[in-house]
Image (cartoon, grey):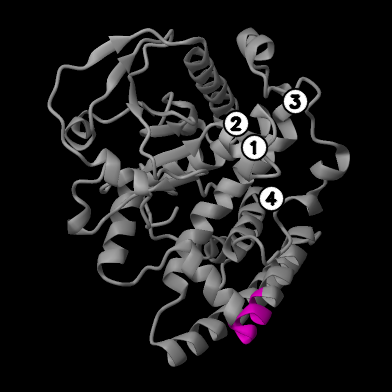
Amino acid sequence: MKLRFLSVLLFFAVCFQAQSQIIKPSPEEKLITERFEYIRIIKKYIGNLFWKNFSNNDFPGTVVYFSDSASYFINPLPEMKEKVSKYTIMENDYDWNIWKLRMPLDSAVFVMETQFQFTPKSKSYINYKTPVLFCSSPELSRKEKEKLNTTQEWSIAMMHELYHQYQYSNEAILTYMLRLYEEKKMIDMDSLQGIYLNNQAFRDTVKLENELLKQAVAATSLEEEKKLFSRFLKLRTKRDIDYLKKKKFYINTPENFWEKLEGTCLMMEKQLKENFRNIQPSEYIMKNDPMYDPSFAFNEQELSEIQFYNQLDDTKFYFGTTGYNMVQLLEKNNVPYKDNFFSYASLPLELQLKYFYKLK
């Protein structure tokens, strides 16, 4: 999630009072709704497997889907009517509320991101204080991203963002995050990653921290785990203090928050990939989606633990990796961290582990 806005938001933020026309979908638009039914099937499956509440609703918030000629609002909030240009209502087989808008000429070529705005000057935007998932069609995605060549790969990327939207849509999480931004105690994920990439001492310490987490995950006794995690906390505390002295900013506040959200999201994604072969799409998708690949599967190498998220890689968010490894420890020890994940929005993963290990 980034706090920049797409150029399309400027287009959407044009008031237009008119009676909305109801239209029947074209074959291409029928495929859009069937792709989202596939997403709903995947969401329900992984929700039941990993995080029960995630499967409660079809969609946790508004999704804006871009084709090469139009945009489609799926599950739009009623108040968005005052913030968009003229739209038509598209009939569909699932009783979803879908608006169709023409595309602006300067719209993004590719986007797959959950975004929101929080500054007073952005009150006219559709994602003001509400997370909106913007996504390009599989066809547009394929043009821009090498690893998004099939409907299945697109759907996995969508699930990552949909899971973040589910997290941000929780009132306690969103309220806490907005308060931190307003108090200037928060930075976005890209900015935090930039600090990691541009500060050698910071990066080297994070690498040591992550190795200790990995060793704790692999430990065969609780006592060994406890010692390794204690060493991890000492390293991290020293890094936080060093950064505070240099920059006068508590880096642990955004780091703890993004570890919590990104770490659990990556665990969801890992479990999704491991079980993806068990999810059956609709017959319509299999027969009519040109980007659906019936031979798609993750091979054994791709499914090995090292191929997922426990290794630091400078091309991905470091706090996703450390957060993921802490989630592994929580899962390994059956710590009920999900029970208060949302209600205690400010509670970091590391503190839950510290409580579990009874460290002072």
Pinpoint residue 163: horizontal percent, then vertical percent.
50, 40
Residue holding disc 3: 277
At x 64%, y 75%, the residue is 206
Residue at the disc numbered 1: 142
Q: Quadrant of residue 24?
A: top left
Three-letter code for the amino acid on which mark 2 is drawn: Glu
| Residue 139: image tag | 2
Q: Amino acid at mark 4?
A: Lys
Of 215 and 27, the residue lying toward us:
27
Name which residue lies at 55% across and 36% down: 158
What residue range appears in magenta?
A: 199-206
Res. 14 mark? none
Disc 3 from disc 2: Cα separation? 23 Å
Cα separation between marks 4 and 3: 24 Å
Q: Secondary structure at mark 3?
A: helix
- The answer to whether residue 69 is above or below residue 266 is above
